[in-house]
Amino acid sequence: MAVTASASETAATTGAATGPAAGPKAVLATRSGAAAVTAGIVLLVAVLAVVDLTQGTAAVGPSEVFRALTGRTDPDDASVIVASRLPRTAAGLLVGAVLGTAGAVLQAVSRNVLASPDTLAVNAGAYLALGVAGATGASLPMLASSGVAFAGGLAAAAVVLGLSGLGTGTVRLVLAGTALTLGLHSMTQALILLFPEQTEGLYQWNQGSISQNGFDGVLQMLPIAAAGLAGLLLTARRVDALALGDDAARGLGVPVRATRVTVVVLAALLSAAAVTLAGPVGFVGLCAPALVRPLARRFRGFARSRTAMPAAALTGAALVLGSDVLLRTLVGGDRAVAVPTGVVTSLVGAVFLVVMAVRLRDTAGAGAPDRLRVPSRAVFLATVAVLVAVLAGLVIAAVLVGDSKLLLGDVVNWAGGRAGRTVSFVLDTRVPRVLAALGAGAALALAGTLVQAVTRNPLAEPNVLGVTGGGALGAVILVTTVPAAGTWGVAGAAFAGSAVTAVLVFGLAARGGFRQNRLVLVGIGVASGTAALISLLIVLTDPFNANKALTWLSGSTYGRTMPDVLPVALALLAGLGVAVARRTELDLLSLDEDTPRLLGLRLAPGRLGFLVLSVVLSSTAVACAGTIGFVGLVAPHAARALVGRRHVRVVPVAVLLGAALVCAADLLGRTVIAPAQLGAGLMTAVVGTPYFLYLLVRSRR
């Protein structure tokens, strides 16, 4: 079975069709039913293809399409269909088919219903590889670009599978893939910002667009896709054996490791072909097998990879064409030209991921992230003293170093109002940037500390849980609709977006006591949805200014003023006061479910209060400095490793670490490659991604 979630489910499905009651008539009925369903999917794909051909800027009906394809109309009228729309539809069919197949076989060999080219970072690796090739200025033909994308995607998949373990049947693989995807996307965004001319159009392409200029691309990628599909069909019997379990497969003489490596390589090849042709069209490889999976429980014909893979391919094609049709129906032909089809598939995939995360059985309970250790008071004081000294040094360096270097005397004169015009201009723009980095880092670190304590989840973090993504979406909505919005308006919009996503994430994950995997997976799904909506807004409102939006979304402090720092400063002061005053309650909530109840503590109000506070901190940080990831993950973990788990010590140390981390990232981003600049969020992703993966490996051990 190509899309089974576990060996037991495969056995149950197969056994149901081979038991005493499964006679020849029953087998014939299931086969005829599978054939009828397949015919229905083919008919659906055909209808969607015809509708897709009729959509565009020019009014064309089904009759015009038929006459153009049969050569019965004027050549000028037929050129619109044959040269533009038909290649687009063909690309949608090819991309959907290869991604659906790749997702089906990846789920089969990993026995993980959440595996796909997206969640295994295959698309992100291919995207980065093509970004590197574009930044070097190399002009590669399409076949060479496909090879580059294949190498990048395969390397990313190898890293994810090596860290998470293949065939474990857990969501650890998806968590590792998502973390690596965030890091790789940050690196690609850095290339786009540093080399805007060489990578022009790469941001829109990254969203996944099936629009084509002629059949050249489709014809060049077709042999690669055909070779990959043929190879997977040849391994179908071995894939079925792997679905029964490693031991059963070995008993049948199947080379387990060689089969898995072969399937992953072929799936990466298919994904590379799709990425080269249309960019990373998101989540088709996740949704298509999920739609086919219920059919396998009902019809025996779909329980084998040889028939399930074509069904997933047809379903993937229907998803891509259906998304394109839906997009052009809702947005309109004129504006839909600028909107990539992948935005719609990403939204659908995000919903799928959230639904599947809620329905999956999660055996990883929420528990204390670290062993109980109580360092001495001297260790705590020494740690705070060192961090204060480091932070002071970073602040001085950040104020003095930049596009123009200053002296401490210049800062003293500026503070006393005696500086010259040049020095005043430099410090008037530089000091707010430094304060914004300090405030955002401290606020995110405190928010991460509160969330990890309340959920007892070591992987919880505002960015991973989608809270900062919701804040970014709220801020982008306001900025794109009301360009003259002020500081407090942006902060309010960011808070509204963060609040909505937080209610959604924590509400869905609260069932069963904030189970570790469910909480993070729901957050990842919501974060993917907000990212797709942000991309849609950027493309629709200002398609020629994506770099400006990317600068803010990468966590940049560029152009910040003192009023921009005020909201996060107030939120940080309030958050510190509450955290210190209720430090004992935080300690109890981070232990277990029973101890607080035995001591008469009401869990629900306490959790709600701390979560609301974390949302306020995250949203004001987003409004101040854009989206900065992983600070809320790294700082609390490092604080607990240094001073233990008592929050009277963890809170100040985490806040100092967060402020120092973002300040250092901002300083490096605007000085190392000056006069070019990189956002602090891109720099923190370089540190946070390996740390997140390290936590996954450690928890696996």
Image (spheres, helix red, strand yellow):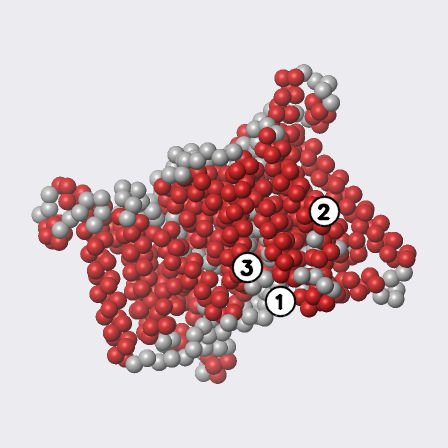
Q: Is residue 572 left or right of residue 460?
A: left
Image position of 648 with respect to 507: above or below: below
The image shows a total of numbered marks equal to 3
Q: Which residue corresponds to mark 3?
A: 161
The residue mark sitting in front, 3 or 1, is 3
Left or right of residue 149: residue 31: right
Q: Is residue 283 visible?
A: no
Q: Position of residue 535 (x, y in %)?
A: 48, 43
Q: Residues within 10 Å of mark 1 (few under 14, many from 20)?
A: few
The residue indicated by pointer 1 is 361
Q: Position of residue 478 (x, y in %)?
A: 41, 44
| Pair 1/2: label in front | 2
Mark 3–mark 1 Cα distance, whole angstroms, equals 22 Å
Residue occupied by mark 2: 310
The amino acid at mark 3 is Leu
Q: Which residue is nearer to you in this view: 463 or 477?
A: 463
Closer-to-camera residue (435/288): 288
Q: Residue furthest bottom?
A: 598
Say which residue appears at 22% left-offset and 47% top-offset.
402
Comparing labels 2 and 3, the label whose residue is closer to the camera: 3
Q: Are marks 3 and 1 in contact (CB under 8 Å)?
A: no
Image spot of residue 157 (x, y percent): 54, 54
**Mark 1 → mark 2, Cα distance in angstroms:** 28 Å
Q: Is residue 368 left or right of residue 676?
A: right
Q: Helix, strand or loop at disc 1?
A: loop
Amino acid beneath label 2: Pro
Query: Of marks 1 and 2, which one's residue comes earlier in the chain?
Result: 2
Amino acid marked by disc 1: Arg
In the picture, the disc for residue 122 is: none
Q: Indicate which disc, 2 or 3, sits on the residue closer to the N terminus.
A: 3
Nearest the viewer among 227 and 354 is 227
